[in-house]
Image (cartoon, rainbow, N blue to C red):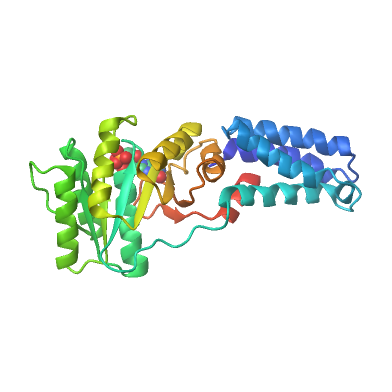
Amino acid sequence: MFESLSERLGGVFDRLTKQGALSAEDVKTALREVRVALLEADVSLPVARQFMKAVEAKATGAAVTKSVTPGQQVVKIVHDELIAMLSGEGPADALKIDNPPAPILMVGLQGSGKTTTTAKLAKRLKDREGKRVLMASLDTNRPAAMEQLAILGTQIGVDTLPIVKGENAVQIAKRAKQQASFGGYDVYMLDTAGRLHIDEVLMDEVQAVRDVANPRETLLVVDGLTGQDAVNVATEFDEKVGVSGVVLTRMDGDGRGGAALSMRAVTGKPIRFVGLGEKMDALETFEAERIAGRILG
Ligand code: GDP
C-alpha cells in the first residue's frame, strides 16, 4: 500500500535530512515535490492544496530553517499534518453496537468487497468481542451473492439468515430483525445489494431498508484502489442514505493511497476499517498513525 507515494516522499525526505543547513528555498522545493507526490497518489486537488497550506505555514518559518535538524523538522511537520488529514476531528469512535440486537447496514457498489467485509467484520465481532452475530444478504438480484455470504458464514462460524426465495430486500430486513430479536443475537448485519454504478433504484432500495432497520451503523464499503472515485462514491452514498463510517478495501494492493488521504477531508466521514486481503482475518481498524507511518516509510 502507498508504495509509490512513500517512495517519492522517502526520496524527498532523504535529501532533506541529509542536508545540514536548509534555506527557505530548499524547503520550498521539497514541499513542491510533496505536493506532486500527493497529486500523483490521486489525492484531490483541493485537499492537496489545503494540506500544503498547513504544512507550508509551519515549515517555512525561521524556527525550522535555523534549527539544528531542519530536515527532520520538516518531515515531522508533514507527518503530523498527514495524521491530522487522515483523522479529521479525531479518531473514529467504536462501533455503536450496544443495545442488542444492533443492526449494521453494509452498503456499497458491487465488487467493492461488501460481502467479504460483512463476513470479516462479523468474524471480528465474534472473535474479539464475543458477540453473537447474524448476517443476512439482501441481494435478491444475485442469488450467487446470497450463497456467497452463507458459505462465508459457515466458514467463520457465524449464522446467516436462511434464504427464502421471492422475498424483497425490505422483507428480508424485517425477517432478519425478527430472527435477531428472538434468537438472542447481539448484532445483525444487512449486506445490501450493490450495483456497478450508483443509480436511483439502488438508492431507493437502500433507503427503504434503512428505514425499516433503523441501523445503528451504516458502513460504506469502497474499493481503496479506485482513488478519487472512492471519495465520490462516499459523498453520494452519504448524501442519499447517510453513512456513519467507511471501510476501504484492497489496501493490500499497490494502490496510490489517495482515497485514504482524501476520504476524511472531503466527506467528513471516518474510515473505520481497512481491508488488507481476501482472507477472513484481513481486516484492521483504521489508525491514522499507522497509515501515516506507512506513507512516510
Ligand atoms: P461485493 O460485490 O461488494 O460483495 O464484493 P465481494 O465481497 O464479493 O468481493 C469482490 C472480490 O474482492 C472478492 O474476490 C474478494 O475476495 C475481494 N476482496 C474483498 N476485500 C478485499 C481486500 O481487502 N483485499 C483484496 N486483495 N481483495 C479483497
Left/right of residue 241 with respect to residue 235 in the rendered view: left
What is the count of numbered marks? Answer: 0
Of 27 and 187, the residue lying toward us: 187
Of 42 and 4, the residue lying toward us: 42
Q: Residue at x 45, y 36 (%)?
A: 230
Q: Residue at x 16, y 49 (%)?
A: 172
Q: Residue 167: where, in percent of width, then height?
A: 10, 44
Ligand 1 found in image quarter: top left
Classify residue 215 by image quadrant: bottom left
Q: Residue at x 21, y 51 (%)?
A: 136
Q: Is residue 297 visible?
A: no
Of 20 and 37, the residue lying toward us: 37
Q: Is residue 296 visible?
A: yes
Q: Residue at x 33, y 53 (%)?
A: 120
Q: Residue 196: where, in percent of width, then height?
A: 31, 30
Left/right of residue 243 with respect to residue 33 in the rendered view: left
Classify residue 148 by image quadrant: top left
Q: Residue 46: where, in percent of width, then height?
A: 62, 34
Q: Residue 60: where, in percent of width, then height?
A: 83, 43
Left/right of residue 55 with respect to residue 167 in the rendered view: right
